[in-house]
Amino acid sequence: MKNIILKNRYTLLVTVLTVYIVVLVIEGSITGRQAQVLNFENPFFDLHIKDLEELVERHT
Amino acid sequence: MNKFHLLQFRALLKREMLEHRNLFIVAPAILAGLVLLFSVWAMTRMGQDLISVGIEYMALLFNGLSPLEMAPIFMFLAIPFIGVFYFCAIIYLMNSLYQDRQELSILFWQSMPVSNLNTVLSKLVTIGIVAPLFYIATMFVLYVIAMLWLTILGWSYDIEVAGLGYMFLAAVASLIFVYLSIITTTLWLLPTIGWVILFSAFAKRTPIMWAIGVFILVGFLEEFIFGTQFLGNFVESRSTPMQYLILDFQDVVERLINYDMLFGILVGSILLAGAVYMRRFID
């Protein structure tokens, strides 16, 4: 196994990235990690892009 | 770790600073010079009355106030330095392991009793602990010059300048918070740093294109294979500066010991381990 992973730089890169993404997916599934980029909250106004998407869908 | 390993690691850090002194010593010095030049120009444009009123107001405003409580105000002054530091840090991380292979100096270093792990760790310690010290030292010198300048001007206008001492202490305390914030940022952004270092060790040319391109590709593959967007969510969830800024000593423990920080260190360590093993492959 070790020989296959360390065969060349590409096999090593693919292995590292696979481990990385699998760990992220498992952790994300367990904790239910959600992106916050859709919600822009500040003291002046609240912007929820998801709400806007719903609004567009309702109109179409 | 015995004395030999400590000396060895110190030598590695010294090497990093000597090889990249333009990024970590010259860049903040030039910025400080520009800030000073701009300040002198701005002061010459202001009238004497305005300057004397400004100094008197500052001295009165800060007189008797706790420097630690006032320190966050002065963190804004560090923004240009932090911006330049982050820019230089990205250039450094992107080139650090790549340059070794391009120049073939990797052959020399691998013939020395220095492990790949120590080499990669030295890059991390340089960017997280050693290099910021030069930026902080430059800002400290700038604050001392500004303080002396204001004091002399205050005396010449016959103003009570005792309050400026409190202001100076607040500025110095802010430097401690800036330094702690940079250390916290390094740990918080360890997955990003690990990603960049991995591609710096991997790419035969243009590591930045590899780093960005593969990130987009992996994101697509995740969506395609697992039907999730956890990579994007993970990156986005770590992009708010308030997650790693230190504005109070009480923030240190809160920022350093929490689930997200520890998980980020774990994920970053996977990528750094990949970079360590990647050093085996020399072009």
Image (cartoon, coloured by chain):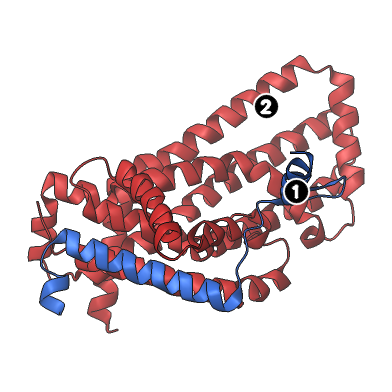
Which residue appears at 58% of the width and 60% of the height?
B238
**Amino acid bearing label 2:** Ser
- Is label 2 in a helix, a strand or a loop? helix
Task: Specify the label residue A8 is tagged with.
Answer: none
* Neighbourhood count class around disc 1 (C-alpha, 10 Å): few under 14, some 14–19, many 20 upward: few
Residue A59, image x and y in percent?
Answer: 78, 39
Q: Are marks 2 and 1 on the same chain?
A: no
In screen coordinates, is B149 left or right of B62? Answer: left
Can you tell which quarter of the image residue B106 is in?
bottom left
Which tint is chain B?
A: red
- Is label 1 in a helix, a strand or a loop? helix
Q: Which chain is blue?
A: A
Viewer-side label of 2, 1:
1
In screen coordinates, is B114 left or right of B191? Answer: left
Residue B163, image x and y in percent?
Answer: 86, 48
Q: Quadrant of the N terminus of chain A?
A: bottom left
Q: Chain of mark 2?
A: B
Residue that numbered label 1 is attached to: A54
Q: Quadrant of the C terminus of chain A?
A: top right
Residue that numbered label 2 is attached to: B39
Residue B131, image x and y in percent?
Answer: 43, 53
Which residue appears at 10% of the width and 75% of the height?
A3
